[in-house]
Amino acid sequence: METITSRENAKIKYACRLREEEKLRTADGLFFAEGPKLCLELARGCTLQTLYATEKALAHTPELEAFAGKTVLVTEPVAQKLSGTKTSQDVFGVFEHPGWQAADILAKGRRILALEAVQDPGNVGTLLRSAAAFGFDGVLLSKGCAAPFAPKTLRASMGAAGRLPVAPVQDLPQALQQLRARGVVCLAAALYHSRPLDEATQSYPDGLCAVIGSEGQGLTDAAVQACDMAVRIPMTDLVESLNAGVAGSVLLWHFRGV
């Protein structure tokens, strides 16, 4: 098994760049993940290129033995450099991007989540995890959304992006119109000019798309107008709104069986 002891090793520097640079992840079709549980989850849906791990981590997580042929042993100082957190988890993976395409989701998806400019990685990750949990089969991301394979998003989603098709779209309103053209009902989450959630029909024979907007501004007028209807979650007047991760998860749960 190859062992790396230098923090200046070219492979280690490249892995650190993958951790930090979205442009490099996109250009090379690779992404970086940290933590034994997350790496094992991602390996169920994505191709592992290289696993970096310390001796202690390999001893503690025997399931990693399945990737012995792709494992590179690293020392504790090297693991600390690879880590994007204060406390290293001692296991790191470089994975191939699953290569999901928006065209496939638009053409075949029946239960879809669409996000518009949701910038917080925690919210995007939470929504990906909820979409996977409640049986949605695709996620569309507009410009301005947090990258699904960035480390913070991956941690929040617990690897859901590796199992659930997730793809960017250049023009979200246009994509929503394309979905509606084949009968998919698009429901915008909005506070104004909207109906309570329980007034929305529960029958969507040709598909449903739940559309969630940014944390601060919500959905743009263009996105709302591209939808069939706007809905809101009934709640008390003690708060003005829920954050995108919570609100979207409530919607996804509500429509879990349609």
Image: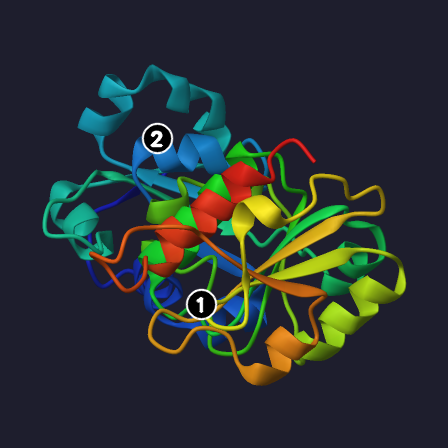
**Element on which disc 1 rests:** loop
Depth check: give the residue in front, 90 or 111.
111
Q: Quadrant of residue 29?
A: bottom right
Q: Quadrant of the N terminus?
A: top left
Q: Is residue 221 left or right of residue 39?
A: right
Q: Is residue 103 left or right of residue 91?
A: right
Mark 2, other Cα within 10 Å: few <14 / some 14–19 / many ≥20: some
Q: Against 216, is 2 above or below?
A: above
Depth check: give the residue in front, 16 or 101.
101
Residue type of the residue flagged with mark 1 = Leu
Q: Quadrant of residue 201?
A: top right
Image point 32% across, 32% down: which residue? 36
**Element on which disc 2 rests:** helix
Q: Against 144, is 124 above or below?
A: above
Q: Is residue 52 left or right of residue 223?
A: left
Q: How is the image coloured?
A: rainbow
**C-alpha separation, residue under disc 2 versus residue under disc 1:** 38 Å
Q: Quadrant of residue 34?
A: top left
Q: Against 93, is 245 above or below?
A: below
- Residue 43 at what x, y percent from top left? 52, 34
2 or 1: tag closer to the N-terminus: 2
| Res. 49 in view | no
The residue where tag 1 is placed is: 191
Q: Against 216, is 246 above or below?
A: above
The residue where tag 2 is placed is: 37
Depth check: give the residue in front, 61 or 200.
200
Image point 19% across, 50% down: which residue? 78
Residue type of the residue flagged with mark 2 = Lys
Image point 25% across, 58% down: which residue? 237
Image point 48% across, 69% down: which residue? 213
